Amino acid sequence: MQISFELTTKVMAVYDKYYAALEDGTAQYLLPDPGYKWVHYKEEERTVETFRMRLASLDVYWLGQINYVQSDQGNRTGITFNTGPELSRLEDAQVLALYEELDAVLGPSS
């Protein structure tokens, strides 16, 4: 399955929002919508534990990307990072809010 640039941009905007909130201390204000109607994630996938496992996988992947960029081999731009992505730092409510937003962006399953 090929993902469009537009969809990738929307997904990354959601992640950026949560990274920024973690860094500026406003993450606690990102709350799930109790009336949200899920469209992409199946019911059995919609648990905090499942979402946390996915976030942990993303954190590992992005940490690897950061390490590559900062390595002698990859860092030709001088980019440095003082923190990792660590979306796993989100509280349960924010994890659910994040995945609601991703669900809305991803839309119906194919």
Image: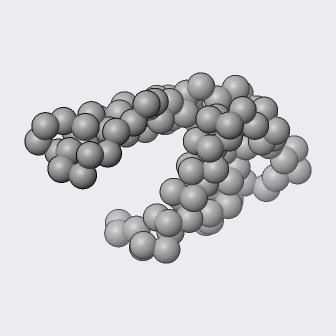
Q: Is residue 44 visible?
A: no
Task: Residue 56: give x, y in percent of width and height.
Answer: 46, 29
The residue at the point 25 percent across, 37 percent down is: 70
Name which residue lies at 56% across and 49% down: 15
In this view, the residue in front, 102 or 86, is 86
Q: Quadrant of residue 74?
A: top left
Residue at point 79% right, 55% down? 37
In the image, 32: left or right of 58? right
Residue lying farthest left? 73
Position of 36 compared to 1: left or right? right
Name the image quarter holding residue 4: bottom left
60 over 5 or under it: above or below: above
Write the residue at 13% across / 37% down.
Answer: 72
Q: Is 31 placed above or below 1 here?
A: above
Residue 70 visible in the snapshot: yes
Residue 13, position as x, y percentages in the image: 57, 58
For this orientation, the residue located farthest to the front is 78
Q: How is the image coloured?
A: one colour
Q: Quadrant of the N terminus?
A: bottom left
Q: Nearer the viewer, residue 41 or 9?
A: 9
Q: Name the one closer to the observer, 79 or 4.
A: 79
**Relative to 17, is 109 on the left or the right?**
left
What is the number of callouts on the image? 0
Residue 68 in the image: x percent, y percent?
22, 39
102 up-or-down from 91: above or below: below
Q: Is residue 5 left or right of residue 89?
A: left
